[in-house]
Image: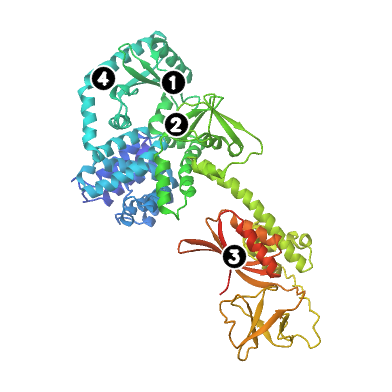
Amino acid sequence: MEQEYIDYIDRYYEQAKIIYDGMKRKTGDDYILHPINVAYILAALKMDSETIGCALIHEAISLNKMTYEEIEEMFGKDAADIVLSITKISNLKQTFKINNPEKYRRIIVGLSENPATLFIKFADRLHNLRTLKVHDEVHQQYIIDETQNIYIPIAHRLGMKKMKSEMEDLCLQYTDPEEYNRVLDRINSSKTELEKSLSKMKYEIMQILNEHNIKYEILSRVKSVRGIYNKLKAGKAWNDIYDLLGLRVLVDTVEDCYRVVGLVQAKYSPIPNRFKDYIANPKPNLYQSLHTTVFGEDKRIYEVQVRTYEMDEIAEKGVASHWSYKEKTDGSVKNNLDKILEQFRVLVEANDIEQNMDFFVNIKDELKRSEIYVYTPKGDIIELPSGATPIDFAYKIHSEVGNTTTGALVNRKMVKLDYELQDGDLVELITQKGHAPSKGWLKIVKTDTAKSRIKAYYYKKEREKYIATGHEMLNNECKKRNVDLNELFNDENIDKLCKAYKLDNLDDIYFSVSTFKVLPSTLLNKLEVKEEKPKIKQLPKKGNKNSNGIIIAGSTDILSTLATCCNPVYGEEIVGYITRGYGVKIHSKNCPNIDLDSERIIEAKWEENLDNRYSAKVKVYVEDVSDILLKIITLATKSDIIVDSINLINRNKELFYDLSVKVKNISSLTNFLDEVKTISNVREVERIFI
């Protein structure tokens, strides 16, 4: 190790001695031994000096021994940011209870912000698991739940196999100690026999490789306790665990990898469908290796993995192996790591955080999913979650492939699109140009990628409809004001409206109009387009004082106003109600607020050929919202009805739209209500009297 590297870390160590001076952990050890052990774990991963240094002082802020500013002054802003990020994650224990979805979300966000934070927290968690026995059951449960739900799945997804395996074994000791000890006893009871078999197989393979002058290193292992436990829990018999005994051959070149597998398979009978080529087709977490499972001469089953030394480094340490070389590269390694960590940021953003429990379920399912590996016709490997369908496969390749998929062949046999793919399946898709995805696919796909792309397709299609409707609504408003829409919406005016309403382009303006974020009249007023003066109706001989076009008791000379409780509409039967000092109120004959037998009721009727617009209130009760709003707006535009406002209300588990509209006559309103009733998922439509 370079002296400069040692000196750099030593600065952190000297400060750590001051921070933890006189402090003890529950184990009885000096407190400083914990950060030292965390630093040792990171050193074994060949982390950079700053990450190891920050590990030594990672609890400085949470213990109130140093401030962010003091760390920044002593070690720089990057170090201060790392320690602060670790502190925020650690402090979540005081804020949230076990299994709180918001806590898990914040942990994932924190871990994905900075690779150094992730590695330090993982090393910190591993050492805490090693010393967990001194804590009470409540604390143990808290740490185990968090580790199993967050840290182990992320370690798996990032290819950090060695750390993941130790965490799993340590957790199992607390979650199922009886079964853990049973498996351990089973391994120990046959350990001598198993090691003897491994030793013999190892020697035989060494002989083969020596004969062919291949440079190599060969390692052997018995599967971990947790690995065997998982297989047994899944219903496997002890003798059916194919990778119980494993050998790993490390060589210098990729060419040697294939030569070794060829020699092993030539000597020993391979088990069908157990050969995996992860060199030509690496896993998404960058894992590369050749796997073959063979029968040894003693009839035992052995899994043989062959890889280069560099591949082995990646296989054991995952992304950590890349980060350790970051100072020796042109930045591509760091970019690669950032790309992998981005999946967790996307995972958090892809879930609806407002629905916390849904998010919690989704995040656990996504992180803890087991993978399958299927093949394209060209032999490329595609990783998918267990239970994935051909549709998931299609969207994994490309969104357009997914959208146009009409069928699938699996292992050259036609299957339904909801077929659950199996590990090793060969998948070939049948596509048709112009085909659209089904909304029903959302119920059968397993990946967030497929779900988001299907939703994106329909959002785009529905947005196009809304844009067309918004254009029509604005065009109608322009016609009423005797202006040309195309002339009015020049670049200058579009820019003015976009700035005023924080929109990006003309399509956004149309979309905002059709979704009632802004009314057509408001937009035109913003552009200072004057409203056309209403036509003045030719008055009868005596002149119409009320201007409502109402004939009261045979006269047009009586002061009257339209009642706002029922908003009478031209063409329907009406009556007048004599008020004290306010003339006559005109009500619909169906208005519940008047007594038709009252002495104050007076005859009223409409004049002929009126060309005004009249307000009406409407309620549309729905099963779900889907694209109902767009359909209502489309029908209103078609019927020459102006929608002044529309609100979606959820009251007492009843979902309905509350509309205010302006119509020319009762016939137009009635036809509109009848057409809205025909929309699917609309339960009931009614005109409202207040």
Q: Are marks 3 and 4 in contact (CB under 8 Å)?
A: no
Viewed as shown, does residue 379 lie left or right of 297? right
> Could you say which disc has been placed on residue 194 in the image?
4
How far across and how far down the image is residue 422, in percent? 45, 29
Q: Are marks 1 and 4 in contact (CB under 8 Å)?
A: no
Which residue carries the number 1 mark? 273
- The amino acid type found where label 1 is placed reads Asn
Distance from disc 2 to disc 3, alpha carbons, whole Å, reads 48 Å
Quarter the C terminus occupies: bottom right
Which circle's residue, 2 or 3, is located before the other in the chain? 2
Q: In terms of secondary structure, where does tag 3 sit?
A: strand
Q: Is residue 46 above or below residue 580?
A: above
The residue labelled by disc 3 is 646
Q: Where residue 446 sits: x, y (%)?
A: 47, 40
Q: CA distance from mark 1 to mark 3?
A: 60 Å
Picture coordinates of residue 165, whole percent (x, y): 32, 34
Which residue sits furthest front?
597
Q: Sequence order check: which comes first, mark 1 or mark 3?
A: 1
Which residue does the image show at 59% across and 41% down from the upper left? Answer: 437
- The alpha-carbon separation of the residues under discs 3 and 4 comes to 74 Å
Q: Could you tell me how far apart the alpha carbons at marks 2 and 4 are, in whole angstroms?
A: 29 Å
Instruction: Identify whether 295 is placed above or below 166.
Output: above
